[in-house]
Amino acid sequence: MASAIGLFGGTFDPIHFGHLRLATELAEAFRLEQVLFVPNGLPYHRGRSAHATDEQRLTMLKLATGRDARFGVDERELRRQGPTYTHDTLLELRRERGPDVPLVFLLGSDAFSRIDTWHRWTELFDLAHFAVAVRADDPEWFKRGPGTFPREAWPRITLNPRELASAPAGKIMTFAMTPLSISSTAIRALAAEGASIRYLTPDPVAEYIRSHNLYARSTEHAPDTTR
């Protein structure tokens, strides 16, 4: 069986140490050869002035991940025209990587609890495994555990990481993530105030944000829901 590849999607607006630590823990927990960061397009209802452009987010990702040989950046969702679905991304990656390479898609327990609302969600398990990161502040998980997941997904849950390495797709496994109270929302708010964001994101990213005056306040304001 070929070495497994991890996939980490998100807006990364901006990327920060919480993202990088989670990707590192994913790589170690599942013995991944590589973790690909897959930046999403920003929904049009979000205030564009409050966010970095696609190219700026991509640049910051490359600045943050360039020194770790295990990390890579996949640009396909930013380049795709029209609606972007995880199903399409996984299908393309499966065709590119072949039928035997294990693909491990990373997401949080809060997002996975709503996976039954995703486009063609039941087919996703034919394309990849799912590594579900459990946050320390997820009250639903600590109240209901895997009961928060759609019932159709329960038979796929495993406690053995070897099952993810020995098959190309189809399994779900949870793991506890190191709690780091860092968020992109908080970083943008600090940058808007002109406050320091050092030690929240890698220095090259912090310098890029400062030198390009990203996230600075403008006369326009729109509600922000980016995690």
Image (cartoon, rainbow, N blue to C red):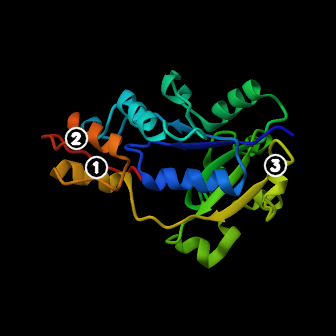
In the rendered structure, find residue 101 and report the number of the disc placed on it: none
Q: Quadrant of residue 173?
A: bottom right
Residue sitting at x 42%, y 45% = 15
Q: Is residue 40 above or below residue 76?
A: below
Residue assigned mark 1: 188
Q: Amino acid at mark 1?
A: Arg
Precedes in sequence: disc 1 or disc 2:
1
Q: Is residue 28 above or below residue 128?
A: below
Secondary structure of the residue carrying numbered label 1: helix
Q: Position of residue 64 (x, y in %)?
A: 43, 41
Precedes in sequence: disc 2 or disc 3:
3
Residue assigned mark 3: 165
User: Is label 3 or label 1 in front?
Assistant: 3
In depth, the one of 186 and 34 nearer the eye is 34
Q: Position of residue 46 (x, y in %)?
A: 34, 41
Left or right, 157 with reference to 166 = left
Secondary structure of the residue carrying numbered label 2: helix
Q: Is residue 183 above or below residue 122?
A: below
Secondary structure of the residue carrying numbered label 3: helix
Left or right, 90 with reference to 162 = left
Q: Position of residue 144 (x, y in %)?
A: 65, 75
Q: Position of residue 45 (x, y in %)?
A: 35, 39
Q: Amino acid at mark 3?
A: Ala
Residue assigned mark 2: 210
Q: Dot 2: few (<14), some (14–19), or many (≥20) neighbours within 10 Å?
A: some
